[in-house]
Image: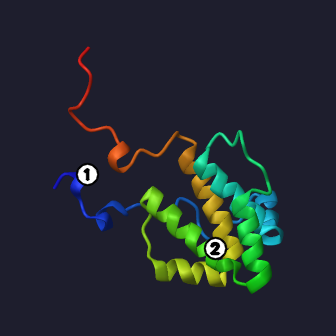
Amino acid sequence: MHPQYAPAESLHNQEWQNGLMSCGPCDLCLLGTCLPCILVGKTSERIRDPSMQTYEPFNSDCMLMCGINYFTGCGWIYTLIKRGEIRERFGIQGNGTGDCCTAYWCSCCALIQQEKEVKARTAAGPVMQGYHAPKEGMQMPQ
């Protein structure tokens, strides 16, 4: 079967490049532990724009996470949502149950892992997946 037409499950064959308990460097660890909303905003901005040219620490994702956490104490739910989006975008193995457990029991570690993962995967350039991926055999004649 051509990879373009493969079921979605078969496209999720990659693993996280960074371990869940790999919390270094220290500044990232402190940010994830003490100011998780800023780290969520930073990771979300990195997904949108890997160059981080328009990054603002208090962006919409940061404020949304902060509001959810302040009013409900359930900021981990936003971490869960973002984790699922990252797994889907980069084809990382896993499921909603694992994401839920990770986000609930170790939210700061999940945020740190997510930031490191997005940073590493976007460093090589934009993600080419789905309809945006170049097709084999469809090239301009030279």
Question: Image point 46% across, 56% down: which residue?
Answer: 90
The quadrant of the picture occupied by the N terminus is bottom left
* Local secondary structure at mark 2: helix
Question: Image point 68% across, 76% down: which residue?
Answer: 107
Q: Is 33 positioned to the left or the right of 106 in the image?
A: right
Judged from this view, the residue extending furthest toward the top is 142
Q: Which mark is residue 138?
A: none
Determine the CA span between mark 1 and mark 2.
30 Å
Q: Nearer the viewer, residue 24 or 32?
A: 32
Q: Nearer the viewer, residue 7 or 105?
A: 7
Quadrant in which residue 75 is drawn: bottom right
Image vertical order of residue 72 relative to residue 108, above or below: below
Question: Image point 71% across, 39% down: which residue?
Answer: 53
* Local secondary structure at mark 1: helix
Q: Which mark is residue 78?
A: 2
Q: Nearer the viewer, residue 43 or 116?
A: 43
Q: Residues within 10 Å of mark 1 (few under 14, many from 20)?
A: few
Front label number (1 vs 2): 2
- Report whether residue 85 is seen: yes
Amino acid carrying mark 1 in the image:
Gln
Amino acid carrying mark 2 in the image:
Tyr
Quadrant in which residue 18 is drawn: bottom right
Quadrant in which residue 39 is drawn: bottom right
- The spot of residue 127 in percent (x, y) is 46, 46
- The spot of residue 85 in percent (x, y) is 51, 64
Instruction: Tell me if label 1 and label 2 are in contact, CB under 8 Å.
Output: no
Q: Which residue is mark 1?
A: 4
Question: Image point 75% across, 85% down: which residue?
Answer: 73
